[in-house]
Image (cartoon, rainbow, N blue to C red):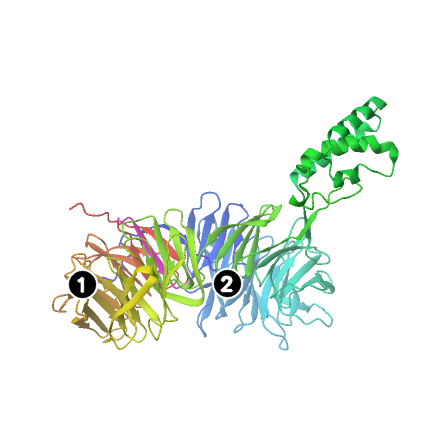
Amino acid sequence: MAGDDPDIPRLELESVIGFNGHVPRGLRVHPDRDHLIYPLGCTVILKSLTDGKQEFLHGHTNNVSCVAVSKTGCYVGSGQVTFMGFKADIIIWDFAKRAIYARLTLHSAKVEALSFSPNDMYLVSLGGQDDGSIAVWNIEKKLAICGNPASAHSAGQCLCLQYSNTDDNTFITAGNGTLRLWELDLPNRKVRPSECQTGKLKRIIKCIEIAEDDQYFFCGTTSGDILKMNMKTGLLNSCGPAKQKFSQGVNVLKILKSQEILVGSGDGCLTLCSGTTFKTLKLESFSTSVSFSLSLSLCLSLSLVSFSAHTHAHAHAHAHTHTHTNALHKQMLEPKNPDLKYIRIYLAIVYTPFLGPPGDNQSNPSLFAPCSSFAPTPTRGSRRVQLEGAVTSIAMRGEGQQLLVGTDVSQMYRFSYTHLEEPELISSSHSSAVTAVAIPYGSSELFATCSKEDIRVWHVDRSKERLRITVPNMTCNALDIMVDGRSIISAWNDGKIRVFAPESGRTLLVIDNAHSMGVTAIAGTRDCKKILSGGGEGQVRVWELQQGGCHRLLETMAEHKATVTDIQIKKNDKECVTASSDGACIIWDLVRYVRNQIVLANTRFRCVCYHPEEYQIITSGTDRKIGYWEVYDGAAIRELEGSQSGAINGMHVSQDGRYFITGGDDKLVKVWSYSEGEVTHVGAGHSGSITCVRLCGSSRTLVTTSSDGAILRWRFPHPLSSD
């Protein structure tokens, strides 16, 4: 029973953490202003901005490479990549029904970009480098109208396209040395290109943004400048900025209602620039108190111009009471026009309380800068914000009051137009394969994951990141949380074992040269005094943790001939089992540091688990079989068909021993009855190969991870036994 029977109950998916930020313009806001649309692996996710509810559009057989939303919001389009020599599908989704409206197949290997016509009549698609063609589709008839090579033979690859905002027969394509305006000739079923003229400028264009009235369109380039082109003539209007280019190229552009342009660049900067010169706009920020005091002073100055001599004398008396007036105030009190002398004195007295106490000139120099008028000196700064990772998507919600930005490290940010310098991180996730999961002993509130360059700690219920530990340019292969909850132990590909504090992320211990070919597996003992590690060279090592952050190597056990993939320790800390790619699982005596038993199979073992009563182990690997084995003598008890396609990479047994969970290359999460060997529930939601599965101690939450960086949280269907 591999669990492929459609009658088997489905696992309830509670939440998904993940976003493929590498897809250009992959983050979209639906016209209903309530749904985010973005890709994750071979799935398109719809997420409500109101309550955070997620819905999933399944239908692609490989990673989604582009996403588009029609102007009315009726349709969502998505394209995918596939293997060389195969056709890549385009799927048009009916947004209201959350179902496939049409599946279109024409392009080879990859669909580079999609765009809907303004009246939802046509969809234009661009093939990848191995295809190089443009196709126009009739949405109502679900058929191709015509096609054409995307660029001239002398030009390079076409990278992006954009449909006109007002005309169903006009769209633009651009790329490496190519920039074309296309006209659809429907009666003759032709699409006719006209080359745009950029003069001596030779650019690689990565993105296109068309003005709302279709008068001009803007192109972002890899050289960091922006081209402004006339939509009617196809001629270059201007190019800029003249001096300070956008670092690492312009990835995405967005025209605002104010005709200013938001620029997302490869260095992670989101910049607001002028729509004419493309220079970065400056921000003028004023102190609230100063603005208020200036307004009050201006009102008083207007009302005091016609004051009588009595008022002058009153003001003069007040001026004498403020003997502590500083040099700045004296300068303000000595205008060139003597007729206004007393009025200026009175205004200075009113102005003083808002500036602060006397002698406090150095607290904010900008507030106390001397000037002959009451106009303040603004603090100037660029309307630019630095984000993590290259900006790949900018989406506007509504009329542009709220902006949503995606980066290539799978971060999502929310901005207000008026507070562009104050980004709010609304979602974060791993941007590469998640290699392992660890759940604290006796807790169901937190879990930790590891991936390339970092370890992250997540809150279960909110699916929010609470802590991130980063080690640049390294990959964490495995991790575990000590039973006392005071440390996270981790295995890294540079051959080091790193121990971190779970609350602050502070490094507690680093064991250098723990393994010569990288640390690939790790586990901590129940007494929290030892760490067991496995390496790429096949050795298993036992480390003793000592006072003062010191450590000592107790023993090296070298019987495996290939990478150690998993380590599990008995509850009494006197025995452990290790799985390896050499086709062996070895049960070790941790008192004498010798082998007790060995289990051999014609497979590369990926995972091993003890039954809670510890008289049996279960194993699995690349042969897709689940094996039951006796701990005492290593005898085989039972063998199950774990999957019909692909290796099993992760396995975990429930605390009561009644069920176990598996996941692997078939992208399915399966819950098995331990005694009967039958699948009780199946979970379909992953878009990549499942890398790890973990069940919390209360058997309430199941966490699974995959190679596309996704973390899925499921409701486990079997509560703990009361026996």
x and y percent of residue 94 in the render?
A: 47, 52
Circles 2, 1 touching at the beta carbon (< 8 Å)? no
Q: How many marks?
A: 2
What segment carries the magenta color? 698-707
x and y percent of residue 361 in the render?
A: 68, 43
x and y percent of residue 396 in the render?
A: 58, 50
User: Farthest residue in the top direction?
Assistant: 310
Task: Give yes or no for residue 451 being in the magenta stretch.
Answer: no
Amino acid type at mark 2: His
Nearer to us in this view, 194 or 541: 541
Identify the image quadrant of the N terminus.
bottom left
Which picture quadrant has residue 659? bottom left
Q: Name the residue under label 1.
A: 574
N-term mark: 2 or 1:
2
Q: Name the residue under label 2.
A: 22
- Helix, strand or loop at disc 2? loop
Whether 338 is drawn above or below 176: the answer is above
Nearer to us in this view, 445 or 626: 445
Direction from residue 544 to residue 208 in the image, left or right: right
User: Farthest residue in the front direction?
Assistant: 323
User: Farthest residue in the left direction?
Assistant: 633
